[in-house]
Amino acid sequence: MGSHTYTKYYYPYVSPFDPCKPIVPKSYVTPPNLYLGFQPPNLPQFETAKEALFHGTLWPALYSRYDKKEPRGDELE
């Protein structure tokens, strides 16, 4: 699918008057279908309906566990 990461980061505005310690950077996970472009014909499918329901998609290429692999800004300390 290419050289990309599913985890994206952004830096929100931090007010000097915020009473809480800010979480910078914030992170979010993007789904694999954003990087597919289009769905190719004859894309492999899960073997059983139970597997597809468990994973939430019919195609293994579009499944993501959304694992947290990289630490966020507040976890670096």
Image: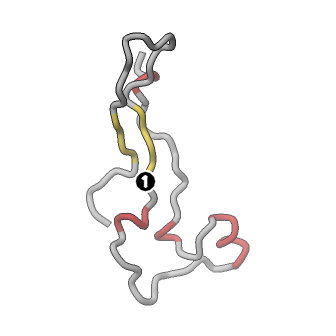
Q: Quadrant of residue 14?
A: top left
Q: Is residue 47 left or right of residue 67?
A: right
Color style of the picture: secondary structure
Q: Position of residue 22 (x, y in %)?
A: 44, 19
Q: Position of residue 6 (x, y in %)?
A: 39, 51
Q: Residue furthest bottom?
A: 41
- Say whether residue 56 is left or right of residue 23: right
Measured as percent of width and height from the top left, residue 56 is found at 63, 66
User: Does residue 71 sit above or below 43 in this rendering?
Assistant: above
Relative height, residue 16 to residue 2 (above, below): above
State how many labels appear. 1
How far across and how far down the image is residue 45, in percent?
Answer: 55, 80
Among the 4 quarters of the image, the one containing residue 51: bottom right
Q: Quick one: 49 or 14, which is closer to the camera?
A: 14
Question: Who's the residue at 43% across and 67% down the image?
Answer: 33
Local SS, label 1 = loop
| Residue drawn at point x = 45 percent, y = 48 percent | 29
Residue that protrudes farthest toward the right in the picture? 50
| Front one among 57 and 24 | 24
Give neighbour class at mark 1: few <14, some 14-19, many 20+ (Cα, 10 Å).
some
**Quadrant of residue 3 in the image?**
bottom left
Amino acid type shown at disc 1: Thr
Quadrant in which the N terminus appears: bottom left
Q: Is residue 44 left or right of residue 9?
A: right
Q: Which residue is mark 1?
A: 30
57 relative to 6, above or below: below
At a point 42% along the width and 15% down the height, the residue shown is 77
Residue that appears at 36% across and 30% down? 12
The image shows residue 31, relative to residue 45, as above or below, that is above
